[in-house]
Image (cartoon, rainbow, N blue to C red):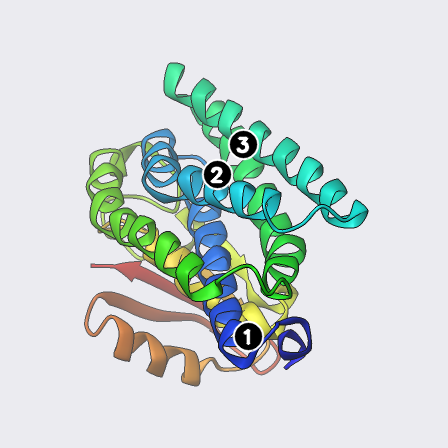
Amino acid sequence: MENLTLASSRESAAALETTSSMLIEWSAKVAAQAQDATAVQGTLDASIIRGLDTLVRELASAGNTGQTALLARFFDHVTTAATTAFEQLSQEPTAARAGAAAQAAITALDVATAEVMPVLASTPAVDMNRLLATLTPAAGESASQTPGSEATAGATGGGGCACGAHDEEGLAELDTRVIPHTIRHATIFGALDGLAAGRGILLVANHNPLPLLAQLEQRAAGQFDVEYVEEGPETFRLSLIRR
């Protein structure tokens, strides 16, 4: 794995992989909620904004080399943009504000995953396990708080209708063919975790995603209705709707 060559130790490499996967899931989750102001606000407030702030502080203390300092300034800029968009959403919870806040957060999370995490993992002074432990409670809060917010806003749009009907035209499409293989399942599960009851996604794949469905059953047994809309041979489309 490439991250093993970047990390200062095997333990750091393992923590790097876990933390990066969590950031990817956060990104996918907020992307799935992008048109739902209440859900986006809840997710950003419960996990992402505080998580980004933690990473900003860690990067600032990781070292004073020119490259690290430049990255720290850039990351602070994109994180500030995400925080500002979140504050604007809090003041005016509209679909447009939600979309802007979601995109700003996704940009910051992408930078964190691709640029910031490798630097932190390769810095001996940074305790990656401690960093992971610091970020994990925020993820737990997100899981416990956000679904309630989404249920409140379930009838107003984003991610499909709230009636529970399997109407693929009302579902947000997630095309797995354009997602890098190494983060594909994490991205999909992040999107599914962001769904409230009665809402779903239309999953598009270039093969029958039976391994993914098996993993989904292990993670969330009986929590999703799965229906094939198109069954190959080149393209598979499945509706996945949370019960």
Q: Secondary structure at mark 2?
A: helix
**Looking at the image, is mark 3 or mark 2 nearer the viewer?**
2
Residue pictured at 44% horizontal, 35% vertical = 35
**Residue 106 vs residue 19: left or right?**
right
Which quadrant of the view contains residue 228? bottom left
Specify whether residue 200 is in view: no
| Residue 41 x %, y % | 36, 32
Q: Residue at horizontal 60%, vertical 42%?
A: 60
Mark 1 touches mark 3? (CB < 8 Å): no
Q: Amino acid at mark 2?
A: Asp
* x, y percent for residue 122: 64, 66
The residue that disc 3 covers is: 82
| Amino acid type, residue under disc 3 in the picture | Ala
- Name the foreground residue: 137 vs 219: 137
Of badges 1 and 3, nearer the viewer stands 1
Mark 2, residue position: 53
| Residue, disc 1 | 13
Residue type, label 1? Ala
Q: Is 167 in front, or is 67?
A: 67
Residue 72: percent from left, percent from top: 67, 41
How far across and down, in percent of the image, does residue 88 sit?
46, 18
Q: Residue at x 65, y 31 (%)?
A: 77
Residue nearer the viewer, 62 or 236: 62
Quadrant of the rendering where the N terminus is positioned: bottom right
Q: Residue furthest right?
A: 66
Q: How busy is the neighbourhood of tag 2: few (under 14 within 10 Å), some, or many (20 plus)?
A: some
Query: Left or right: 164 with respect to 64?
Result: left
**First in sequence: mark 1 vs mark 3:** 1
Query: Does 225 sit left or right of 65 as displayed?
Result: left
- Between the C-alphas of marks 3 and 2, the distance is 10 Å
